[in-house]
Amino acid sequence: MARQSTRKQKSSNGANLGFEATLWAAADKLRGHMDAAEYKHVVLGLIFLKYISDAFEERRTTLDTELSDPKSEWYVAEPQARYRSLEDRDEYKSVNIFWVPIEARWATLQANAKQPTIGTTIDDAMVAIERDNPSLKGVLPKDYARPALDKTRLGELIDLIGTIGLGDKENRSKDILGRVYEYFLSQFATAEGKKGGQFYTPRCVVKVLVEMIEPYKGRVFDPCCGSGGMFVQSERFVEAHGGKIGDISVYGQESNPTTWKLANMNLAIRGIEGNLGPEHADSFHRDLHPDLKADFILANPPFNMKDWGGERLKEDIRWKYGLPPAGNANFAWVQHFIHHLAPTGIAGFVLANGSMSSNQSGEGEIRRNIIEEDLVDCMIALPGQLFYSTQIPACLWFVTREKKNHRFRDRGGQILFIDARKMGTLIDRVHRDLSDEDIAKIASKYHAWREEKGAGTYEDVPGFCKSASLEEIRKNGYVLTPGRYVGAEDVEDDGEPFEEKMGRLTTLLLQQFTESQNLEHTIRENLKGLGYEF
């Protein structure tokens, strides 16, 4: 029987690593002509392999120290007996460390990195790990031996990834490798463009959702979980507020088979136990968690999904508020979330802006019914250019069954609208990011509205937020666009009298007109000298 480990597990605290970008640049350079979508699985599979090998070797070193020290209560004098103890699988599995057979350990791969058979060696390692760890069955990529994958570059990639985790003990294994994995996910999303959005939700958007609904303890569900970012951020939130991994139970589902594998690896590399089902599956047509009632739902479903098979689900029990149109799954997702929500639960999810105002194909009627049921808690209009997959403007919905009996204040018959379209900063030509300060401003306003202890007193802010009554929303035709409710931003008076300001501005304008005429005269004279008089 395995001994209980006394080792204290370090939690990830988000310290800056500093080398992710350099590592990415080097790895991307090795990609050659391979498409980013294909290369993604090559790299992320190897990072996962490095993670489980590092964690295994760290545990093995700890065991060896204990078994070799005559002063230790676990001391074993006979070398062969000590070796057998080091190779005892229970010594690893009892502390949630994956068992890594000899042929799959990173040292073995590193030693064979320059061999032309390295692809087969990696495939064999993946097979061996899945064989000895049933929870990883069907999860790991096993196509490294294919002829199209350059084996020289593959060996160089192994050497590169081998440099991860060589820092001091405070920054080893899960912390560094987990964050490198997350960084690479975001970079692949950028490289893939539209396709990238199918597996990755920008971290700032996930953080807004998590900071709003605060998943301290309970069941967290994402029925379109992509690579699992919602779960990772939820666990971070729990740890940042004094909790621990395991305070939340993770449930998810993903229809894309390769993305489902990414999600499982992402959870494993973070030490998060989750139930993503035995395989990939479509949430509408094969709900893997039919009886689940979640305390927290976080999701970023595909925007305006057309081919979702709605014509085959016309009598489905989930459509309590109306039959979703066969040509757009937005309100099928909304009702799927509501169906899985616990009586005291809350859901936060991303949708295209059209969901807030569309009246096509019965969508307006469904939205009206959900509003009249008093399920909508808060609506947030997001700035553009946050997503890798689309330029379609997006919003956040927050839905709860507990508005009238909320733990902080009765907000029944009201909806909080937040217009965040002017927030965020461009990080490149096409992508915008919300800062921690932006996120805190949004979340604190919501929690003040809820009158959570310590959040402060809520007040409407023209141009930013407004608590609107159900009657006001009815008058606006059940449209949930925040801009319709928050009004215009107050412009601060600079104290200059109107007559003085107009005099100053018209004088300035006259000077600019004069300068414009002088400039035009100079240009004409220069052109005349070149023989282009007109």
Image (tube, rainbow, N blue to C red):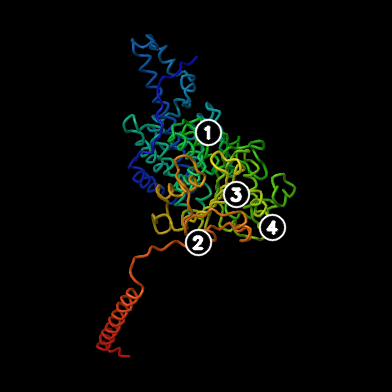
The Cα–Cα distance between marks 1 and 2, rounded to whole angstroms, is 37 Å
Other residues around mark 1 within 10 Å, as few (<14) / some (14–19) / many (≥20): some
The Cα–Cα distance between marks 3 and 2, rounded to whole angstroms, is 20 Å
Dot in front, 3 or 2 = 2
Q: Nearer the viewer, residue 13 or 356?
A: 356
Q: Mark 4 falls on what kind of element?
A: helix
The Cα–Cα distance between marks 1 and 4, rounded to whole angstroms, is 37 Å
Res. 202 visible in picture: no
| Image coords of residue 330 (percent x, y) | 62, 53
Q: Which mark is residue 59?
A: none
The first of marks 1 and 3 along the sequence is 1
The first of marks 3 and 2 along the sequence is 3
Q: Mark 1 falls on what kind of element?
A: loop
Q: Name the amino acid type tagged 2.
A: Gly
| Image coords of residue 4 (percent x, y) | 46, 17
When the figure is inspected, residue 112 is found, relative to residue 351, above or below; the finding is above
Q: Give the image quarter of residue 251.
A: top right
Q: Mark 2 falls on what kind of element?
A: loop
Dot in front, 3 or 4 = 3
Report which residue position mark 2 lands on: 487
Q: Mark 3 falls on what kind of element?
A: strand
Q: Nearer the viewer, residue 229 or 360?
A: 360
Report which residue position mark 1 lands on: 217
Report which residue position mark 3 lands on: 376
When the figure is inspected, residue 152 is found, relative to residue 1, above or below; the finding is below
Res. 248 visible in picture: yes
The first of marks 3 and 4 along the sequence is 4
Q: Are marks 1 and 3 in contact (CB under 8 Å)?
A: no
